[in-house]
Structure formats: C-alpha cells, structure tokens
Amino acid sequence: MPYFVYRVAPNLELRYIDTKDRYQEARTLVRSLREQRAEDDDGDYRLIFASQQGEAERLLSTPRDERVIGED
C-alpha cells in the first residue's frame, strides 16, 4: 500500500501533494515541506498509509480523539 502526502489546513481542508511507495521517501518529502513552509503558514504536512486516495482523505478528515496519558 502506498503513502499519501497531504497539506492539512486548520479547518481540515486537504490538498493532495504526492504518493510514495516507500515510507522513507514519504517521510523525507514531508520533512522537507515542513522546513520550507512560510512562518505564517498554519497548515501542516502529513503522510498517511492507505490502500487508495479516498481512504487516505477519509482518515485524515476524521477528527482524532484526545490522547489520555495516565489515569484521572
């Protein structure tokens, strides 16, 4: 399964960037995009492992639960 690279805006607006077959290539691309972004850019670059582009977009647009660390 391929790795999809997206730019994710704060309002969960997704913009497709590229698809890579290897994790190392996708990770390198995301890291370089993060280094090159402007300081006033509030979006983030993410990679997602999915079988197809539609699934990747669904996974990225689904809000994630807050992580609970330890007990209350």
Image (cartoon, rainbow, N blue to C red):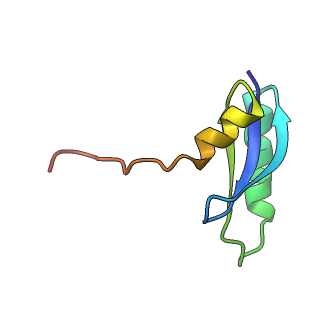
The residue closer to the viewer here, 12 or 47, is: 12
Picture residue at 72% right of the left edge, 76% below the top: 39
Picture residue at 77% right of the left edge, 73% below the top: 38
The residue closer to the viewer here, 56 or 67, is: 56
Residue 8: x percent and y percent? 68, 57
The residue sitting at the top extreme is 1
Quadrant position of the N terminus in the picture:
top right
Whether residue 67 sits left or right of residue 8 in the image: it is left
Q: How many marks?
A: 0
The residue sitting at the bottom extreme is 40
Quadrant for residue 21, please give it. top right
Picture residue at 61% right of the left edge, 45% below the top: 60
Residue 24: x percent and y percent? 75, 32
Residue 28's place in the image compared with 52, above or below, is: below
The residue closer to the viewer here, 34 or 20, is: 20
Residue 44's place in the image compared with 26, above or below, is: below
Picture residue at 73% right of the left edge, 30% below the top: 23
Residue 67: x percent and y percent? 35, 47
Whether residue 63 sits left or right of residue 24 in the image: it is left
